[in-house]
Image (spheres, rainbow, N blue to C red):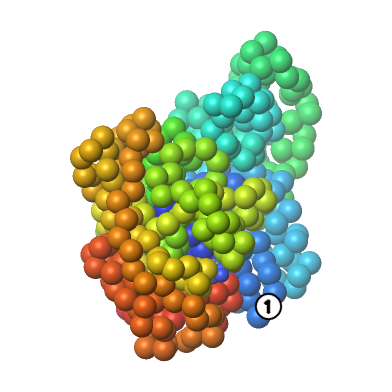
Amino acid sequence: MPNVVVVGTQWGDEGKGKIVDLLTEQAQVVVRYQGGNNAGHTLVVGGEKFIFHLIPSGILHPGTICCIGNGVVLDPEVFLGEIERLKSRGIKLGPENLRVSERAQVIMPYHQRLDKAREKAMGTAKIGTTGRGIGPCYEDKVARRGIRVADLVDPKILRAKLQEILPEKNFLLEKFLGDQPFSLEEIFAPYQELGQKLKPLMANISVLLQLAVDTGKNILFEGAQGTHLDIDHGTYPFVTSSNPVAGGAATGSGIGPGALSRVLGIVKAYTTRVGSGPFPTECLDKIGDHMVECGVEFGSTTGRRRRCGWLDMVVIKEAARLNGLTGLAITKLDVLSTLNPVRICVAYDLDGERREVMPPTLAELERCQPIFEEVPGWTEDLRKVRHFEDLPVNTRNYLKRLEELAGVPIQVVSVGPDREETMVLQNPFA
Ligand code: GDP
């Protein structure tokens, strides 16, 4: 059976949550493979709004097993809090439908304090992190001093690790950042307790996925953030600390890359960015305001206003290559209604030279001027449209041009936040 990886093609917030939810109907297993609780998927189901930070939204579908892969950094308090919130809304959660990798890294209180203190110390040069300790946790993973989920349930290991780690963290916090240190006891007891609460959900996700593959189940891999926030391929250093690109689904969940047969790229019909970093097609005018207002472009985790601009096909083509996209899902097409003309960035002008590939340095990307193609806009409200043929001719032409430029077929078109406001042109699982 084909497995599908869902990736954001831009800087995150493409509307992956809704598309994942839609595809989950066909998946028996859903896996988050990277990121932490800095991601936020917003879903509207039957007019009811759900926000997910860590748990795959597939949890709304009875019978679907949702997994947190080893590539994720897990804040146990946030995770358990999310479980409780969903339970209070009548969603059933337990080991039968929710499993956490025993190898996932744990976000500790010192990661959060370091994150916030560092951003403060950096002043205007700050990355714009969400201050949730994600970056510092990934740093410790690579430095081989991380605490993993399995460590929380063994008091000896947990104590020994904290004894080793804390002096360095406290030195940094106190002496370098002028913040408060931690005592071992204030972390040890509560984290041991959190470990006990996580214990029933702990699993070897790699084994679970192999079994799913062997028994012909459909697996959906859900990436957080987006391609251009990838630590290796994104607009470094204004990136996240993990690999949202499709290859990250293999390392972040413990499955061989051969099992990732389809890759669906989520493309918002315009571009948004949170935090700092170059953004060639940014609209700092009324058009940008229109996108913010009509697209409700405020972070679901942070509430921060997102920067908005025209669709950038240099960004999308790069994502098509980096992820090996086999299909596109266009979201928030409805937001472009009434804008005329609609612009598409097809290349950059860098110091008088045409560029179709993103340059490696921020300094060069800052100097890139977008080269736009214009297509006639449309005034119709698209939210009631359910069939591609019923879209206004200008909207269809816009989509056809995107498909042509990307060189990847459009499989899904979304015209509103609700599950029903979607057109599936080709089933990504087919
Ligand atoms: P994600 O992290 O990629 O899932 O993105 P977010 O959840 O942060 O942002 C997507 C937002 O757009 C959510 O509030 C969705 O309900 C909403 N949304 C998704 N698809 C559409 C669409 O086609 N049109 C409109 N107007 N809103 C959409």
Number of on-image labels? 1
Locate residue 178, reporting x and y percent. 71, 15
* 398 vs 263, nearest the viewer: 398
Residue found at the far top of this picture: 175
SS category of the residue bearing label 1: loop
Q: Residue at x 58, y 27 (%)?
A: 124
- Whether residue 54 sits left or right of residue 331 in the image: it is right
Q: Residue at x 57, y 50 (%)?
A: 306
Q: Residue at x 27, y 62 (%)?
A: 406
Locate residue 415, reporting x and y percent. 50, 75
Q: Label 1 belongs to which residue? A: 47
Please determine whether, in this image, residue 332 is positioned above or below residue 426: above
* 6 vs 256, nearest the viewer: 6
* 161 vs 311, nearest the viewer: 311
Can residue 163 be seen here? no
Quarter of the image with the C terminus in it: bottom left
Residue found at the far left of this picture: 353
Can residue 404 be seen here? yes
Locate residue 338, reporting x and y percent. 50, 72
Quarter of the image with the N terminus in it: bottom left
Quarter holding residue 209: bottom left
Locate residue 392, reporting x and y percent. 41, 83
Q: Residue at x 73, y 19 (%)?
A: 179
Q: Disc 1 marks which amino acid?
A: Gly
Quarter holding residue 106: top right
Please determine whether, in this image, residue 298 is positioned above or below residue 145: below
**Pointer 1 residue Cβ closer than 8 Å to ligand 1:** no
Q: Callout 1 environment at 10 Å: few (<14), some (14 to 19), or many (20+)?
A: few
The quarter of the picture showing ligand 1: bottom right
